[in-house]
Amino acid sequence: MPPIRAPHGNHTIPNPGPVQGAPMQDIQLRLSIDELNLILEGIGNLPFARVFALVGKIQAQAAEQLQAAQGGPGGASALPAQG
């Protein structure tokens, strides 16, 4: 399987391809909200059927992280109610 390339071919990420029976490896990226929105804008130019699951996954993970950072329900910084 070929490496993953940036739109202009300036950067590559080795892509060893799927290994039989092995789960897909996740990576974590640190991006600003503006950078993430730019990525989503670019992905939005691709056919919907190809990217809808990816867009949903990105939005769900971003919402979860923003909610945790703001101390929302289930967030790491949420404080217990005082009684």
Image: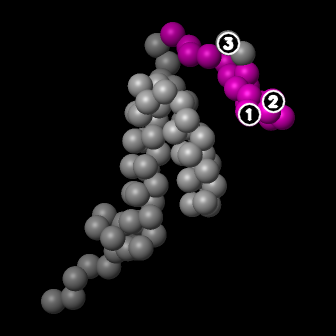
Could you tell me how far apart the alpha carbons at marks 2 and 3 are, in whole angstroms? 16 Å
Q: Quadrant of the C terminus?
A: bottom left
User: Which region of the structure is painted magenta?
Assistant: 3-20
Mark 2 sits on what residue?
A: 9
At label 2, the amino acid type is Gly
Q: Which mark is residue 6?
A: 1
Which kind of residue does numbered mark 3 sit on? Answer: Met
Q: SS at mark 2?
A: loop
Which callout, 1 or 3, points to the residue nearer the camera?
1
Q: Secondary structure at mark 1?
A: loop
Q: In this rendering, is residue 19 above or below 53?
A: above
Q: Residues within 10 Å of mark 2 (few under 14, many from 20)?
A: few
Is any atom of residue 30 visible in this view? no
Side of 77 relative to 3 (left or right) = left
Mark sitting on residue 1: 3
Name the amino acid type tagged 1.
Ala
